[in-house]
Amino acid sequence: MVLTLTMPIRTFVASLFLLLASISANAKDVSYEEILASPDDIKLSYLYAQQQVIKGDLEQATSALERVLLLQPNWDTARLFYAAVLFRLDDAEGAKRELKLLQDRPLSANQQREVSKYLALATAKSKKTRLTGSIATGFRVDSNPDMTTSSSNDLNGNPLDTDERVDGAFLATSNIRLEHNLPGGSGNFAFIEANGNLNEQFQVSEADYLTGGVRAGASFFLQDLQLTPYVSATALELQEQLYRSEYGGGLTAKYTVDPKLSLSLGAQGIYQDYRAVSDDSVGSARDGWLYVVAGGIAYRTSETNRISARINGYQKQASNDSYSYEALELIASDVFLLGRGQYVLASASYRWQNYDQPDPKYSATIARKDRLFKARVAYGIPVDTLLDFVNVEHGSATSGLNVQIGANYLNQDSNIPNFDADSLSADILFTKRFAY
């Protein structure tokens, strides 16, 4: 795969695939022998194309749709489906060609909007230099935003503050990515991207933070293998005080086994530079290198469902061994597309983290061991689709705008009672994506 599809394109493609797949799901499977026996039966070939998309054989689907359009070039629905399949195969120029043929056709208002919107995205995607990004704002309500301990007493029996405070927060995130094709025509490209995240609590100021980062590198394609070396730098502010800065680099490798299955492997080294702030006076004792190795698998069970799993290993070498640790993290997620741009996202992770030495602040003999569990479920829908459901007209202002609601659970279990905590939260985010 040469380029990763932007979210609007993926949503468009998946919506079409889901619509057509739902039609063919109730139909009898069409064999290739039947196609050979009736090469002029366009409905049979169209059904076969739908079937092959569901199975992940996009090349066969393309051949079937080309045969359909050769016999009936004015079948606009088939051409729109063909354009979607070409998107899925990363043939932006081919998709543009088909979409341009649809521009002057007597399409429905919804089809016209889709053709216009995604022709612009395809044009941006096929440029030598591409700019993509997103901006999101929203709100969250959290039962325990500063992770106040749920334990009543510490290791020595002293009482702990267990006064959890429910609070709301304003959220904002942004990212922007610039890509430029490298010479050679093999799909290699260089990139630079920046991102930022803001969490501004209404009352619990201890949980306020601002992060920003930049990453630059290049992706190289060796047939089905994609190699991406990069360098990065990030900064974290707590309560308007610089708490941590990081810089380093890494390498990721992704191998596409087939259109349904891909494997990934990565490693990075990050130097972390801490500063003392009002809520954490440890400062430079935490300084040191953090090494991370990761391996993952992603499997597309259908054109509307994708599951992935990843395992991360961490080793932190702090200047004070009380803050050095080893950690292992398991992450799993599932994305299910519901049609018309709607989706459900579910994810969960579990992390084991063991520190090398006791922290005298809590115990002279017991080294800290944490177990952290996180879970999230979210539902997203394009604002245009939402407005269609309530029969409200919409224009270009809402194009590419998505709304997502989510719920989260976090639980931390530690052998040091001070760090036992959990929280429940819910959020809503409005995201605008763009591509040039």
Image (cartoon, helix red, strand yellow):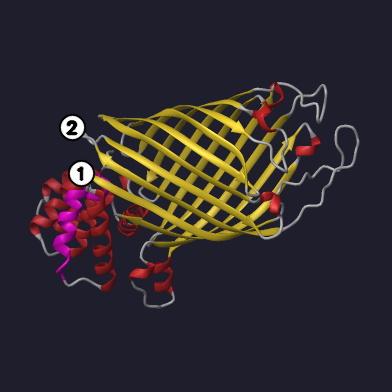
Q: Amino acid at mark 1?
A: Gln
Q: Main secondary structure of the magenta part?
A: helix
Query: What residue is drawn where x is 69% and y is 41%?
Result: 277
Residue 16 placement (x, y as % from top left): 31, 58
Relative vertical location of residue 215 with respect to residue 19 in this rendering, above or below:
above
Give, as a single range, the part of the protein colored magenta.
86-105
**Label 2: how many residues lie within 10 Å, few (<14), some (14-19) or many (20+)?**
few
Residue 224 placement (x, y as % from top left): 28, 30
Q: Quadrant of the C terminus?
A: bottom left
Residue 47 appears anywhere in the view: no
Residue 360 is left or right of residue 406, and the answer is right
Q: Quadrant of the N terminus?
A: top left
Relative vertical location of residue 150 with respect to residue 329 in this rendering, above or below:
below
Residue 424 is left or right of residue 16, and the answer is right
Relative vertical location of residue 119 with respect to residue 55 in this rendering, above or below:
below
Disc 2 is placed on an element classified as loop
Query: What residue is drawn where x is 32% and y is 50%?
Result: 131
Q: Residue under label 1, please give it.
A: 60
Pointer 2 and pointer 1: residues touching (CB < 8 Å)?
Answer: no
Query: What residue is drawn where x is 39% and y is 43%?
Result: 193
- Residue in the foreground of this view, choosing between 308 and 322: 322
Residue 96 falls in image quadrant: bottom left
Sequence-earlier tag: 2 or 1? 1
> Which numbered tag is attached to residue 281?
none
Disc 1 is placed on an element classified as helix
| Residue 173 belongs to magenta span | no
- Residue in the foreground of this view, choosing between 420 and 245: 245
Residue 160 falls in image quadrant: top right
Q: Amino acid at mark 2?
A: Gly
> Which numbered tag is attached to residue 184?
2
